[in-house]
Image (cartoon, rainbow, N blue to C red):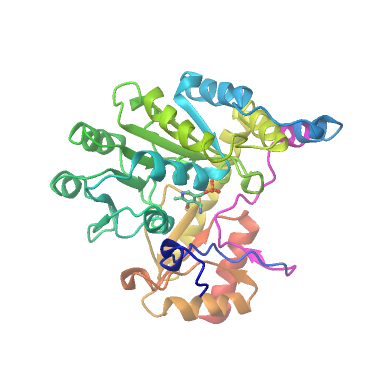
């Protein structure tokens, strides 16, 4: 370890994303990407950018994209912040809004990047256990005492289970004095968004990504929706760090994507239909499948240990995600919803190894 490193860097345990293999012929159901290509409008808009404008800096305010996002959600542009993937938006939120003496609350089974950011920014955290059925217990947050903020994904990851909007609102109503971040990376697959609550709850920050439902993981675009005061805090951090949040290709592609809401509705419906079919197929084989509102399912089989089942599926050229920790979920597989053919291939591979 370098003696020149800061103490903070010595203490970091960075997030490790799912495997991105270079090998052809693998069916990749491990990082919750969309199995379908994005809207044609995205590709056309990106192609148009490549004809000359790349020598110019992009718009540091991302005004066109913010207007498209605001329009999509029925909000105002000053309620929108954009960043290089929702991971970067989350990092800015940790830096700008969640660094307080009281602990940040998050579920004990949740997106594993949250504790990584907390470490980076020296934020104390407190894990709140999911219920026995893996749902989020709002009362436990409300009874936890003073907090420096609350963050959770909705639907939760990696369980896929969604908290109803009325429960999100109960959490906001009972927690008026610190920021509540709802990470809606997977909300477009049938869950309820908290975005309409923004006008009533100035402490609410909703974070979104174009990586999942919009099929643009490779473009790296995420955004936050919230009261203009929260957005200004995020912008101050961004402008103290990198004044050009998104490149020209990302701005053009993301703006075009949002102009094609019909594509989103159609693609999401296809994925939801495949999710229900895959869940049924897994249950028929003896799996316990948590009720998912996301583009993945979280499932375990009483006769199989999680890590070895994932390894056996990999030998059949199917990649799924398995988490060694916490122990309570070690036997679950997180399986991204692929095309109907890919889901069928997964079930066939299971039959071959079971
Ligand atoms: N939040 C959650 C809950 C996620 O699962 C992910 C994807 N790993 C992200 C945020 C980040 O997505 P991206 O940076 O691609 O927008």
Q: Is residue 62 shown left or right of residue 207? A: right
Asked whether 268 falls inside the magenta stretch, the response is no
Image spot of residue 239 (x, y percent): 53, 34
- Residue at screen point 48% across, 31% down: 235
- Residue at screen point 21% across, 33% down: 177
Observer able to see residue 347: yes
- Residue at screen point 81% across, 35% down: 47
Observer able to see residue 272: no
Q: Front-most of 223 and 166?
A: 223
User: Where 323 sits versus 49, above or below?
Assistant: below
Image spot of residue 221 (x, y percent): 59, 40
Q: Main secondary structure of the magenta part?
A: loop
User: Where 189 sits versus 117, above or below?
Assistant: above
Q: Front-most of 275 and 48?
A: 48
Image spot of residue 301 (x, y percent): 40, 73
Asked whether 36 falls inside the magenta stretch, the response is yes
Q: Is residue 193 shown left or right of residue 50? A: left
The quarter of the picture where residue 131 lies is: bottom left
Residue stretch in magenta: 23-44
Image spot of residue 255 (x, y percent): 65, 29
- Residue at screen point 56% across, 58% down: 31
The quarter of the picture where residue 206 lies is: top left
Question: How many badges with numbers are in the image?
Answer: 0
User: Where 280 sits versus 140, above or below?
Assistant: below
The quarter of the picture where residue 40 lies is: top right
Residue found at the far front of this picture:
4
Q: Is residue 264 shown left or right of residue 73? A: right
Q: Front-most of 81 and 134?
A: 81
């Amino acid at each position: 370890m370098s003696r020149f490193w800061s103490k903070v860097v010595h203490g970091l345990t960075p997030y490790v994303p799912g495997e991105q293999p270079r090998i052809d012929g693998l069916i990749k159901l491990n990082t919750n990407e969309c199995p379908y290509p994005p809207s044609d409008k995205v590709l056309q808009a990106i192609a148009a950018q490549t004809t000359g404008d790349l020598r110019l800096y992009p718009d540091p305010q991302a005004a066109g994209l913010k207007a498209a996002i605001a329009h999509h959600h029925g909000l105002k542009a000053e309620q929108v912040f954009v960043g290089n993937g929702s991971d970067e938006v989350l990092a800015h939120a940790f830096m700008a809004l969640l660094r307080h003496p009281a602990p940040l609350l998050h579920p004990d089974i949740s997106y594993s990047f949250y504790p990584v950011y907390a470490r980076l920014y020296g934020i104390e955290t407190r894990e709140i256990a999911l219920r026995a059925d893996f749902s989020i217990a709002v009362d436990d947050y409300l009874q936890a005492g003073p907090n420096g903020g609350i963050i959770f994904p909705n639907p939760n990851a990696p369980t896929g289970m969604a908290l109803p909007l009325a429960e999100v609102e109960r959490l906001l109503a009972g927690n008026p004095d610190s920021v509540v971040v709802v990470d809606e990376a997977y909300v477009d697959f049938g869950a309820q968004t908290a975005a309409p609550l923004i006008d009533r709850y100035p402490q609410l920050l909703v974070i979104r990504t174009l990586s999942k439902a919009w099929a643009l993981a490779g473009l790296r675009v995420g955004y936050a929706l919230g009261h203009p005061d929260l957005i200004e805090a995020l912008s101050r951090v961004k402008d103290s760090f990198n004044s050009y949040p998104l490149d020209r290709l990302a701005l053009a592609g993301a703006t075009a994507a949002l102009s094609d809401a019909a594509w989103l509705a159609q693609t999401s419906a296809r994925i939801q239909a495949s999710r229900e079919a895959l869940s049924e197929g897994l249950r028929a084989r003896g799996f316990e499948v948590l009720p998912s509102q996301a583009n993945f399912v979280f499932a375990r089989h009483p006769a199989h240990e999680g890590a070895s089942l994932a390894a056996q599926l990999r030998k059949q050229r199917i990649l799924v995600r398995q988490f060694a920790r916490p122990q309570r979920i070690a036997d679950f597989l997180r399986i991204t919803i692929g095309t109907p053919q890919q889901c069928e291939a997964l079930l066939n591979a299971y039959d071959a190894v079971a």
